[in-house]
Amino acid sequence: MRIENRSKFLLIWLTVLTFGLVCINISRSAPIDSETVEVAYLFNKGNGNVAKDISGNGRDGKITGAKHVKGVIGDGLEYDGVDDNLIVTGYNGIGGTDPRTTVFWFKTTTVRDHSWVKWGVNSPSQKYYIRAHVRGDECNLRVEVNSGNNFGTDNVCDGEWHHCAVVFPDGSDAVKDHDLYVDGKLQEKEGTEFAMDTSVDSQVVNMGAPLANHTFMIGSFDEVAIFNVDLTEDQIKTIMDNGLQAALGVDPQGKLATSWAMIKTY
């Protein structure tokens, strides 16, 4: 009887402790409004050549060539650097000088100007192109608009997984207004200033395919999303630490995962 009572007491104590940790750690995390996400992919293998959009906007992507491999969380995609691509059918991205944030995980040992995410026409100010900036035997996170660019300093082509975030703040109007983050660290800004006026008239969002004179992405790619707001550093770290589904709480299962993800983080 004493053993049974002790077991019940222990179960109650663990339940209370777990609930307390969940509450504490959720309060420490930076809340993210799921209504601000335009498109988000987890790349689960069970969806075949379809990248299932978890944003609720129905913007499923078409995967061409890229293979499912082990990702940072669950599955990811492996690009061969030759012709692999993902097309976000029917979605032309965010236009003009509207705020935006793009996040993703990437891993490679190949130094080249990997084409990660792009949209807009290839004209001054109207192109929006997130790719790698080659610097000797390293490559850095870069965003460019045709005639202007902004790139960081941390190497993302060293064979390790790196979380990348490209933030265009509300009220900004030029490419060097972007804030770039690698593994949650704000990057120093280098590059050439130029005005932004991103076109959304004709070109859908691509993830992998290059513009002229550049190269296809080669390496592993995971947990990518585009937001229509300028996420804060804390919000970016919440996504990096807990994953998109947990950070967004996109469904009841995702909300439960958020709680446990917070517990594991602290």
Image (spheres, grey):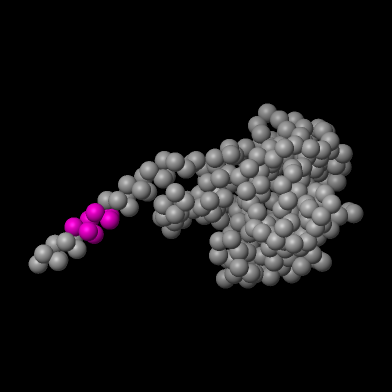
Q: Is residue 175 shown left or right of residue 235?
A: right
In the rendered structure, does residue 94 fall within the stretch colored magenta? no
Q: Is residue 121 above or below residue 72?
A: above
Q: Tell me residue 61's x, y (percent).
A: 67, 60
Q: Is 12 part of what is drawn in magenta?
A: yes
Q: Quadrant of residue 231?
A: top right
Q: Position of residue 252 (x, y in %)?
A: 42, 55
Please tell me which residue is depicted at 44% across the width and 41% down the height of the picture: 28
* Quadrant, the N terminus: bottom left
Residue 204 image position (x, y, % from top left)? 75, 52
Position of 194 with respect to 102 (left or right) is right
Residue at 75% over, 30% down: 173
Magenta residues: mostly which secondary structure?
Answer: helix
**Given the current orientation, which residue lies at the most extreme top position?**
171
Camera-nearest residue between 26 and 198: 26
Residue drawn 19% across and 63% down? Answer: 7
Residue 10 occupies which quadrant of the picture?
Answer: bottom left
From the viewer's side, name the closer residue of 126 and 2.
2
**Residue numbers of the magenta segment:** 9-15
197 sits to left or right of 11: right
Q: Is residue 234 left or right of residue 50?
A: left
Whole-percent x, y for residue 68 in the image: 64, 69
Residue located 18% across and 57% down the image:
9
> Vertically, is 62 above or below 266?
below
Residue at the left extreme?
Answer: 1
Observer able to see residue 261: yes
233 above or below 45? above
Residue 41 appears in the rendering: no
